[in-house]
Image: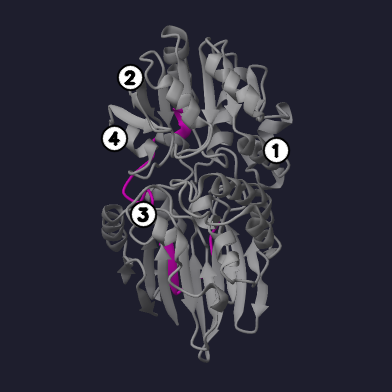
């Protein structure tokens, strides 16, 4: 059996891992968009470096674009097999892939309008016809050589570890791809669950060198930031956030503060159609909530709505926020600030020293978000140079990715002696090197940091 890494190898985005059995069957794990403006990103998104028509099966860990965003291009270039995922992942992909296709249609490759679009809305619709859902914890026999089991990772709604039993050259092999590992201190969703014994593990490592701050004081920190920016300084608080996961966590926190009477009397806007629809999907899937959240909604049936909150879907309503001269909170996508309505709000408010941008998650260094995190004094938005005078703040508590302790806890269900290989994916190389060292100290062995486009016989 061979594993080839075509994305998220010594980088965070663009998840694509190809498993090839001795009999030639090929299983692609995820098919994600390489995000950011790296030197080779456009090439990586256009050329798979394998033949899409030769892939037998695609299995998707979750809906985020860096895991699912190239599925329509894969189909456009010849893939016509099934795409397996959990039921909520399909619901979210129906939103995300259609939205991504519109971005591709409008902007070429999303960064360079002179290029042919990566795919069209028709390609996205064709891809969605190939999806097949498999619930958590129900073994599914894909064919005589491949059994699939999804286990919950608590990252976002529908996120799963992909567990495979493979008949390979007369032997049963077991493999787990973690997808993205959520946090064991999870506010809304269930925590990551144990997964079956696996001799080969592909493990994400985004925050593998960090420990997140405790969630205990998250609302208090957020309340203080809102108070300082919006009340004391009279500015606007812009919160770029991914439409799925991060936005709902933020709304829940603000709702909690509002219910307790601790949220200042200011308007809160969620300006993102995708976020609005994704929040509706989360509302409609309470069976994936953790026990604490289920108890909470007994007293507050709508944890994603409060009197000061307005959801904005229409473009004209979004434009009106540009002339809204009162202090407010604006939550808008995208989280890395590379697309979406957040760029309009940044263009209009980054030069205001009374305003602030609150970054709540990972930003790839070459993105607009990454540049702001790294202290850029000037940035370009829609071709215009913008002076950065607004305060750039960070809150890592809202990250949907597990930290080092979460990753270690996720792996703890395994027998170290029976693991033959651990491949670290979805992280920067320096982070992977630190995580490898720390895991070796815990007794794990045979840890690899794979290189892009290289294949490993296991």
Does the image show residue 268?
no
Q: Is disc 2 placed on a helix, strand or loop?
A: loop
Q: Residues within 10 Å of mark 3 (few under 14, many from 20)?
A: many
Q: Of the residues tagged 2 and 3, which is closer to the observer?
A: 2
Q: Which of marks 2 and 4 is nearer the N terminus?
A: 4
Q: Distance between the residues labelled 2 and 3?
A: 31 Å
Q: Report the residue at 60% width, 44% height from top.
A: 189
Q: Report the residue at 60% width, 71% height from top.
A: 79
Question: In the rendered image of this protein, does residue 252 appear above or below residue 424?
Answer: above
Residue at which label 3 appears: 427
Choose between 371 and 120: the one closer to the eye: 120
Main SS class of the magenta portion in the image: loop
What's drawn in magenta, residue-wise? 193-218
In the shown orientation, is residue 119 left or right of residue 433?
right
Q: Earlier in the sequence, mark 3 or mark 1?
A: 1
C-beta proximity under 8 Å, tags 3 and 1: no
Q: Of the residues tagged 4 and 3, which is closer to the observer?
A: 4
Q: Distance between the residues labelled 1 and 2?
A: 35 Å
Q: Of the residues tagged 1 and 4, which is closer to the observer?
A: 4
Residue at which label 4 appears: 374
Q: Distance between the residues labelled 2 and 4?
A: 14 Å
Question: In the rendered image of this protein, does residue 265 appear above or below residue 329?
Answer: above
Q: How crowded is mark 1: few (under 14 residues within 10 Å), some or many (20 or more)?
A: few
Q: Report the residue at 46% width, 34% height from top.
A: 215
Residue at which label 1 appears: 280
Residue at which label 2 appears: 389
Residue 197 in the magenta stretch? The answer is: yes
Q: Earlier in the sequence, mark 1 or mark 2?
A: 1
* Quarter holding residue 446: bottom left
Q: How crowded is mark 2: few (under 14 residues within 10 Å), some or many (20 or more)?
A: some
How far across and down, in percent of the image, does residue 353 sit?
35, 14
Q: How crowded is mark 4: few (under 14 residues within 10 Å), some or many (20 or more)?
A: few
């Amino acid at each position: 059996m061979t594993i080839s890494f075509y994305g998220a190898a010594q980088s965070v985005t663009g998840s694509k891992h190809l498993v090839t059995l001795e009999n030639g069957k090929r299983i692609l794990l995820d098919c994600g968009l390489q995000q950011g403006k790296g030197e080779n990103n456009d090439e990586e998104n256009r050329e798979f470096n394998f033949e899409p028509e030769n892939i037998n099966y695609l299995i998707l860990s979750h809906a985020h674009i860096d895991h699912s965003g190239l599925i329509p291009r894969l189909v456009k270039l010849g893939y016509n097999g099934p795409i397996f995922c959990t039921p909520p992942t399909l619901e979210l992909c129906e939103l995300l892939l259609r939205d991504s296709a519109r971005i591709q249609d409008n902007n070429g490759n999303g960064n360079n309008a002179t290029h042919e679009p990566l795919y069209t809305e028709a390609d996205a619709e064709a891809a969605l016809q190939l999806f097949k859902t498999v619930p958590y914890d129900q073994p599914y026999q894909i064919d005589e050589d491949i059994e699939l089991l999804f286990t919950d990772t608590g990252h976002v709604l529908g996120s799963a570890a992909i567990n495979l039993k493979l008949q390979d050259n007369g032997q049963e092999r077991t493999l787990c791809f973690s997808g993205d590992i959520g946090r064991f201190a999870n506010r809304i969703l269930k925590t990551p669950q144990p997964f079956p014994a696996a001799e080969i593990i592909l493990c994400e490592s985004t925050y593998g060198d960090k420990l997140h701050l405790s969630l205990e004081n998250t609302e208090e920190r957020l309340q203080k930031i809102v108070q300082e920016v919006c009340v004391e300084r009279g500015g606007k608080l812009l919160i770029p956030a991914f439409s799925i996961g991060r936005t709902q966590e933020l709304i829940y926190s603000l709702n909690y503060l509002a219910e307790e009477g601790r949220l200042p009397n200011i308007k809160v806007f969620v300006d993102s159609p995708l976020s609005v629809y994704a929040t509706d999907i989360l509302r409609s899937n309470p069976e994936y909530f953790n026990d604490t959240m289920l108890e909470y909604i007994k007293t507050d049936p709508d944890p994603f709505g409060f009197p000061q909150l307005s959801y904005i879907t229409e473009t004209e309503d979004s434009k009106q926020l540009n002339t809204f001269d009162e202090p407010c909170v604006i939550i808008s996508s995208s989280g890395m600030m590379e697309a979406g309505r957040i760029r309009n709000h940044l263009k209009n408010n980054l030069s205001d020293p009374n305003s602030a941008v609150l970054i709540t998650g990972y930003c790839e260094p070459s993105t607009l978000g990454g540049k702001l995190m790294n202290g850029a004094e000037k940035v370009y938005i829609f071709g215009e140079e913008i002076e950065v005078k607004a305060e750039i703040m960070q809150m890592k508590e809202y990250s949907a990715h597990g930290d080092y302790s979460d990753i270690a806890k996720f792996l703890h269900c395994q027998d170290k002696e029976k693991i033959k290989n651990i491949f670290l994916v979805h992280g920067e190389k320096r982070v992977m090197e630190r995580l490898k060292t720390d895991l070796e100290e815990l007794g794990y062995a045979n840890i690899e940091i794979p290189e892009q486009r290289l294949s490993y016989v296991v």
